[in-house]
Image: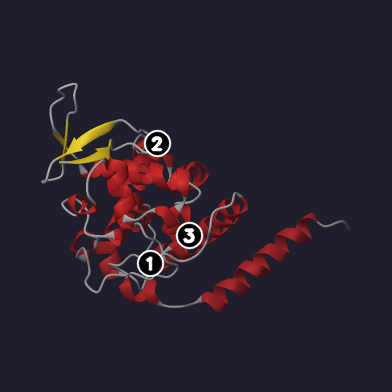
């Protein structure tokens, strides 16, 4: 058996690793336990928080989890799957903490406010991970602007449609809201020392998940893939100038 560390970044207690990826008890006689995907994701998040995204390799993560890197592949299919899993893990927590208790009668504005504050909390708590949210999802690299969380996009569109938005206005709202929110928060995490370099160089050749679980994304693929950046920039600039004019001295 190889000697390794527990699945907790910064903890140096030695444990034994079995060949099948379970972590065995040491001299204290603790029972062997198997790693779970959730434990691996939590450890990966802690690793990036403490050491930065460039240190997130399968080998380094395996060491932090007390197993050989190959043992991780029982739960994650590679670095891109790991990054997608981290984003899903953070977004699931966001929905549990910020959105689970809201009611339909609270209105779509309440949904957008809660979502924005929850996303900003992710940015503040995990500045080195946050730029990953603004990368292309391997399952839908055509989405503009890009957003790594399929759940976020699908739920966003579904929520607005439930309040009477049609496909066109829901997509328009997605573009405006996501551009504002991610742009603002990327500047904020950059000021906190986070690197904004791309993590998209390793996009897998094959789609990891089908879009069948995301009917809104599947139906709106054409609208979501259209590039209206120039028009949206001019409209946002005009809106900003109008706001500044309203507050300017007369």
Depth check, front residue: 156 or 108 = 156
Q: Percent position (x, y) of residue 190?
A: 58, 55
| Left or right, 100 with reference to 229 | left
**Residue found 42% across the figure and 39% down from its top:** 106
Residue 36, visible in the rendered structure:
yes
Going from N to C along the chain, the mark reached first, 1 or 2, is 2
Residue furthest toward the left? Answer: 20
Residue furthest toward the right? Answer: 250
Q: Percent position (x, y) of residue 224?
A: 38, 71
Depth check, front residue: 112 or 125 = 125
Q: Percent position (x, y) of residue 188?
A: 59, 52
Which element carries disc 1, helix, strand or loop? loop
Residue 154, visible in the rendered structure:
no
Going from N to C along the chain, the mark reached first, 3 or 2, is 2
Which residue is labeled 1 in the image? 136
Near mark 2 (Cα within 10 A), the count class, few <14, some 14-19 or many ≥20, is: few
Q: Nearer the viewer, mark 3 or mark 2?
A: 2
Q: Percent position (x, y) of residue 205?
A: 24, 74
| Left or right, 65 with reference to 175 | left
Depth check, front residue: 235 or 133 = 133
Report the disc number at residue 178: 3
Q: Nearer the viewer, mark 3 or mark 1?
A: 1
Quarter holding the C terminus is bottom right
Which residue is labeled 2 in the image? 10
Near mark 3 (Cα within 10 A), the count class, few <14, some 14-19 or many ≥20, is: some
Q: Quadrant of residue 243?
A: bottom right
Vertical arrangement, residue 15 with respect to residue 228, above or below: above
Going from N to C along the chain, the mark reached first, 3 or 1, is 1
Depth check, front residue: 199 or 216 = 199
Give the alpha-carbon distance from disc 3 to disc 1, as whole Å: 13 Å
């Amino acid at each position: 058996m190889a000697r390794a560390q527990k699945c907790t970044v910064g903890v140096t207690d030695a444990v034994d690793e079995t060949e099948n990826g379970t972590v065995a008890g040491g001299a204290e006689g603790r029972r062997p336990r198997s790693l779970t995907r959730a434990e691996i994701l939590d450890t990966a998040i802690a690793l990036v928080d403490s050491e930065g995204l460039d240190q997130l390799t399968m080998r380094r993560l395996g060491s932090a989890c007390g197993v050989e890197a190959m043992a991780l592949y029982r739960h994650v299919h590679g670095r891109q799957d790991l990054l997608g899993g981290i984003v899903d893990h953070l977004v699931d927590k966001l929905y549990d903490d910020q959105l689970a208790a809201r009611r339909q009668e609270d209105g779509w504005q309440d949904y957008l406010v809660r979502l924005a504050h929850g996303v900003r909390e992710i940015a503040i708590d995990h500045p080195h991970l946050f730029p990953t949210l603004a990368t292309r999802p391997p399952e839908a690299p055509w989405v503009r602007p890009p957003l790594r969380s399929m759940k976020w996009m699908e739920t966003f569109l579904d929520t607005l449609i439930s309040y009477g938005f049609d496909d066109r206005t829901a997509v328009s709202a997605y573009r405006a809201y996501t551009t504002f929110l991610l742009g603002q928060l990327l500047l904020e995490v950059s000021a906190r020392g986070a690197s904004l370099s791309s993590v998209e160089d390793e996009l897998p050749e094959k789609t990891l998940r089908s879009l069948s679980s995301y009917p809104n994304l599947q139906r709106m693929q054409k609208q979501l893939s259209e590039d209206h950046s120039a028009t949206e920039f001019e409209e946002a600039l005009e809106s900003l100038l109008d706001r500044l004019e309203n507050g300017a001295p007369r």
